[in-house]
Image (cartoon, rainbow, N blue to C red):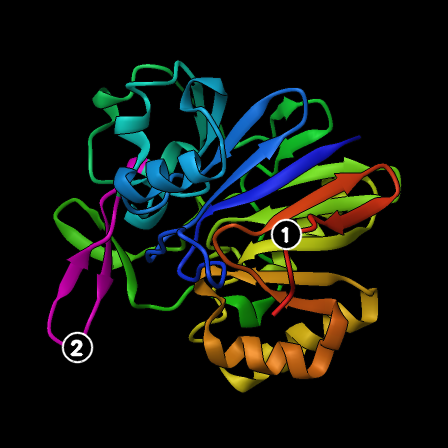
């Protein structure tokens, strides 16, 4: 099993680089195929960073959408003008999604319609995207402290209801020594996702990469997350919605088992583990 993971879009960028950052996330996962995991908030940033990484849009053969929020889907329509990639996602990604603020509910769903996407496969079940690279399918929620905040809503029958974001999925890469989990926003919860991934591949997880949605987590959730990661010896690379405060807490508690990710971050997953690219440094 050999795979390369590059962060194409993140809130943060590689220091002293020409990458652009935005509130969003996208990874490029490559083994014998190139799989784009989410498309960031805008095609402008996605395209700029792909070019800077030396990647051709035409070479992307599959696109996986982790969930139906704008900051993970904004670049999708335009990249399909260059790539004939098949798209994979959960059936609920096209629900009307909102986030409640102090004064109003703001639309945060996909900025286009399902009819605009001609080649999409929607499934709640796990799919093998490429050899030893799987989607999680819909993730079982078992840890009660990882609930989706009430501020996340969806429109049903002209009423705004609490959105559990059941469309939130991740990718699992199976190696000889366990699983590597790649996250989008992880509304399903970090521990829920790891446990689900372990059941899926029948093995432990040793590395997690991506957005953790700990940005608004309380002290109890952060401390229990740290306790779990320590217990099972899981290294975490936090991106996007992990947040500054949670990142500081994780770094302090986990030391070398935590790293803050950024646009331009590159990692290689091998049969017996992983290593960072020469141009990638932990912060």
Mark 2 vs mark 1, CA separation in Å: 42 Å
Q: Secondary structure at mark 2?
A: loop
**Count of picture labels:** 2
Q: Is residue 12 left or right of residue 103?
A: right
Q: Is residue 37 left or right of residue 222?
A: left
Which residue in the protein does label 2 denote? 102
- Residue 247 in view in this figure: yes
- The quadrant of the picture occupied by the N terminus is top right
Q: Give the mark, 2 or 1, whose residue is nearer the N terminus.
A: 2
| Residue closer to the observer: 221 or 144 | 221
Q: Which residues are magenta?
A: 94-109
Q: Position of residue 75 (x, y in %)?
A: 30, 36
Q: Residue at x 63, y 55 (%)?
A: 280
Which residue in the protein does label 1 denote? 279
Q: Position of residue 11 (x, y in %)?
A: 39, 60
Q: Secondary structure at mark 1?
A: loop
Q: Residue at x 62, y 57 (%)?
A: 192
Q: Position of residue 170 (x, y in %)?
A: 56, 44
Q: Residue at x 55, y 72 (%)?
A: 145
Q: Position of residue 279 (x, y in %)?
A: 63, 52
Residue 98 lies in the magenta stretch? yes
């Amino acid at each position: 099993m050999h795979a390369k993971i590059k962060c194409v879009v993140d809130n943060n960028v590689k220091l002293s680089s020409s990458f652009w950052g935005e509130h969003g996330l996208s990874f490029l996962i490559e083994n014998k195929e190139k799989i784009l995991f989410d498309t960031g908030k805008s095609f402008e940033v996605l395209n700029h960073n792909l070019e800077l990484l030396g990647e051709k849009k035409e070479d992307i053969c599959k696109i996986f959408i982790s969930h139906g929020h704008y900051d993970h889907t904004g670049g999708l329509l335009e990249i399909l003008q260059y790539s004939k990639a098949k798209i994979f996602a959960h059936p609920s990604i096209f629900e009307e999604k909102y986030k409640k603020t102090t004064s109003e509910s703001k639309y945060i769903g996909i900025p286009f319609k399902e009819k605009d996407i001609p080649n999409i496969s929607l499934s709640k079940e796990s799919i093998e995207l490429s050899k030893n690279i799987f989607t999680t399918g819909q993730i079982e929620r078992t840890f009660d402290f990882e609930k989706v905040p009430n501020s996340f809503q969806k429109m049903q029958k002209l009423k705004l209801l609490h959105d559990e974001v059941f469309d939130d999925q991740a990718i699992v890469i199976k190696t000889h020594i366990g699983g590597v989990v790649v996250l989008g926003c992880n509304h399903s919860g970090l521990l829920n996702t790891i446990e689900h991934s372990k059941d899926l591949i029948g093995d432990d997880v040793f590395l997690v990469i991506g957005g953790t949605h700990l940005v608004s987590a309380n002290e109890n959730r952060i401390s229990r997350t740290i306790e779990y990661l320590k217990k099972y010896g899981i290294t975490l690379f936090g991106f996007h919605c992990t947040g500054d405060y949670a990142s500081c807490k994780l770094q302090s508690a986990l030391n070398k088992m935590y790293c803050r990710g950024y646009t331009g971050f590159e990692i290689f997953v091998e049969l017996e583990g992983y290593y960072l690219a020469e141009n990638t440094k932990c912060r």
